[in-house]
Amino acid sequence: MLELLIFLGSLLGIAAMVLLNRQLGLSEVAEITSLDDAARRLDTDQIGFQAGQGLLSDDKRAALVEEKGSGRIGLLIASGSDVVIRYLDPGVVKAAKMGEGRDIHLALNDFTFAPIDIAISDTAMARHWADRLNTMQG
C-alpha cells in the first residue's frame, strides 16, 4: 500500500511540474521569425553588430547573417526553447556541403557544436551561402 501511495505521489508531482512548465511557457520551441529578428538577437548578444545580407532557413530554425564591414557571419540555431549563436570567422568552418536536395550541411571546428542541416528551398541561394561558408574553412 505504501508503494502505491509513493507511486501516486510521484505521478502527481511530475504532472504538476509538467503543467507548471507549460503555463510558464518554458516548453515552447524557439523560432527565428525573420531576418530582422535574427539581426536583433545578434545585436543583443554582441552590441554593435550591424547586419548585412542574411539567410533564413525555410523551417525558421536557422539563420546566417553577415556583419557589415567585417565579413564575419552570425549563425543562429533554434535549439529547444532558446537560440544558440556562433560567430563564424575564417578558420571556424570545417565544411559546408549541399545535402540531399537543397539543404546546407554545416560542420564547425568547434567540438561543442554538432553539425547541423540548414533547410533552404532555393537551390541558388543555398549554393551561394555554402560557397561563402566554405571560404571560411580553416
Image (cartoon, helix red, strand yellow):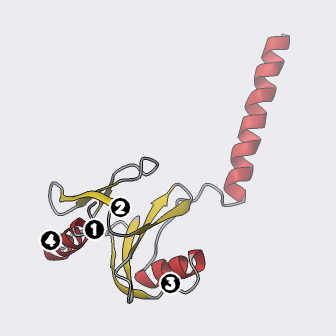
**Residue type for callout 1:** Met
**Residue type for callout 2:** Val
Mark drawn on residue 49: 3
Does label 1 or label 4 sit earlier along the sequence?
Answer: 4
**Residue type for callout 4:** Thr
Asked where in the image residue 3 lies, by quadrant, the reply is top right
**Nearest to viewer (mark 1 / mark 4):** 1
Determine the CA span between mark 1 and mark 4.
Answer: 20 Å
Does label 3 or label 2 sit earlier along the sequence?
Answer: 3
Q: Residues within 10 Å of mark 2 (few under 14, many from 20)?
A: some
> Relative to 91, is 122 on the left or the right?
left
Please give the residue where the numbered disc 2 appears in the rendered image.
92
Q: Are marks 2 and 1 in contact (CB under 8 Å)?
A: yes
Does label 3 or label 1 sit earlier along the sequence?
Answer: 3
Determine the CA span between mark 4 and mark 2.
Answer: 24 Å
Q: Between 48 and 8, which is closer to the camera in this rendering?
A: 48
* Above or below: residue 30 compared with residue 2: below
Asked where in the image residue 135 lies, by quadrant, the reply is bottom left
